[in-house]
Amino acid sequence: METITELFGWSTLLNAGLLVSSTIAIIAMRECITGFHSKLFGMQKTDVLNEYFRFLANYKILILIFNLVPYIALKIIET
């Protein structure tokens, strides 16, 4: 039980770090990245930006559901 709890804790931390670094990268290099992806996928730059934020929102929800909630539940069970 302790090992699985620790696994979910580290998984939450690593995924949250990846989310934060992805967000910072998208914000810092917005022009370069949107230009590349708009040409690559044949989309408008505004549509690419919307997809970036949709990706970040979905990733955040997945982290909450599959990492943080199980971690909290296991912590509650341990006590």
Image: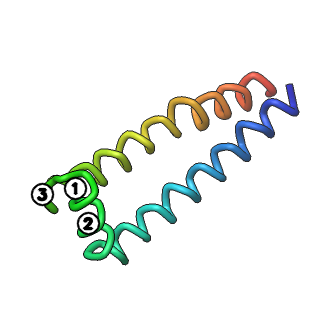
Nearer the N terminus, badge 3 or badge 2? 2
Residue 49 on image: x %, y %: 22, 58
Where is residue 28? Give x, y as percent: 37, 77
Q: Residue at x 29, y 72 (%)?
A: 30
Label pair 2/1, CB-CB below 8 angstroms: yes
Give the residue type that dot 2 points to.
Thr
Marks 1 and 3, how far apart in space? 6 Å
| Colour scheme | rainbow
Q: Nearer the viewer, residue 16 or 22?
A: 22
Specify the label residue 34 is tagged with. Answer: 2
Residue 28 in the image: above or below residue 18: below
Residue in the image at 24% along x and 69% along y: 35
Residue neighbourhood size for the residue with mark 1, other residues' Cα within 10 Å, grouped as few (<14), some (14–19), many (≥20)? some
Quadrant containing the N terminus is top right
Q: Residue at x 18, y 53 (%)?
A: 42
What is the C-alpha distance between the residues marked 3 and 2? 9 Å
Q: Is residue 61 left or right of residue 38?
A: right
Which quarter of the figure is the C terminus placed in? Answer: top right
Q: Residue furthest right?
A: 2
In percent of the image, x 73 and y 32: which residue is there? 75
Q: Position of residue 45 (x, y in %)?
A: 16, 62
Label 2 and label 1: CA atoms lie apart by 6 Å
Tell me, for residue 48, which label it has, or none: 1
